Amino acid sequence: MTAAQANAAWAVHRPGGRDVGLMAIAVVGVSMSGPLTALVAAPVLAVAFWRNAAGAAALLPVLLTSERAAVAGLRWRDLRSSVVAGLFLAAHFAAWLPSLNMTSVAASTALVTTTPIWTALVAHFSGVRLSAAVWWGLALAVVGAGLIAGVDVSVSLEALAGDGLALLGAIFAGGYVLAGARARERLSTSAYAVVAYSVCAVAVAVGAVLADVPLLGFSGRDWLLIAGITFCAQLLGHTLLNLVLSSVGPTMVSLVILLEVPGATLVALILLQQAPPLLALPGMAAVVAGVALVVRASRPTTLVEPAT
């Protein structure tokens, strides 16, 4: 990736009213992911497989009808970034989902949403110069996430391992966001999502077979929870974020995902009776303030238009 390409891909764009609305719905959707997953008794690899397989199946009719002509002209080079994104997404789920059963939902969610740290590092090493305001916003949001997770570090070795897996999941999520941004330069949202989700599902299925993890034979309650996770997190969450990715940029999407931290903590409080520690409250405020700072810093006069 050249410096010019990285600048175009990593520019922070001021979202319009439609983008703000879609991102708000997406945040609600992804905020349900961690708490609902923590309620499922089925193996986490099965959850990852079914949410991605069902998500791809739900979007396939759209791809084969309204976008049929565009699909016919696709070539391998158009799909490579989507395939890479799917592999990163599979690695993200394989690392993050187990952490939800090892540490608290609040800590796991806070750490997995540190994706902007890793994406900013990629941008920096690609030659991108982010504005001071964006860096301050990133730092404030990440510090807020760290405050929420910090209490959990000394709880137990299992909790510490869960923290490590959540961080690893954040790194893989950064790869997913980067590859997705490249893919969306050539593909529509549904085409990209169908390919990425399908590749993710296949990769997770292969991992499940190798690890001798069952993908069937669960209780009715688990199937209902998996359906809820698919609808909320996969269709309303990931898919809507993919939809706005090309217009607001991956940096903005990564930062907006930080709002999952207070969202998931609140849902966990209601569904799991997991009350966050007092230290989590200023952390949530810092996350929201960091996102607001970055949005404020992305003024039209400082925009870098996305590559066509």
Image (cartoon, rainbow, N blue to C red):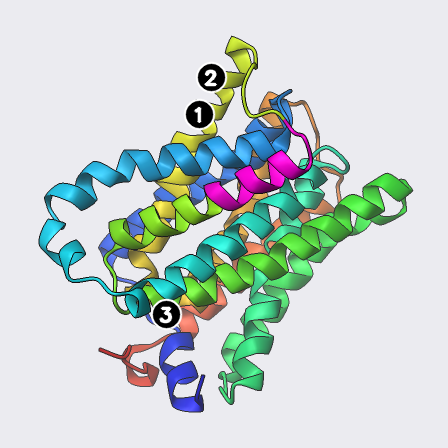
Q: Is residue 90 above or below residue 50?
A: below
**Mark number displayed over residue 7:** none
Residue 91 locus on image (x, y percent): 59, 51
The quarter in which the N terminus is drawn is bottom left
3D distance between C-alphas at marks 1 and 2: 6 Å
User: Which residue is tagged 3?
Assistant: 182
The kind of residue tagged 1 is Gly
Q: Is residue 196 magenta?
A: no
Q: Residue at x 34, y 71 (%)?
A: 13
The residue depicted at 61 percent of the width and 41 percent of the height is 207
Furthest-top residue in this view: 220
285 or 232, nearer to the observer: 232
Judging by the rendered image, the residue that carries numbered circle 2 is: 224
> Crowdedness of circle 3 by 10 Å Cα count: few (<14), some, many (20+)?
some
Q: In which quadrant will I find the C terminus?
A: bottom left
Q: Is residue 6 left or right of residue 169?
A: left
Q: Percent position (x, y) of residue 156?
A: 90, 40
From the viewer's side, name the closer residue of 147 and 243: 243
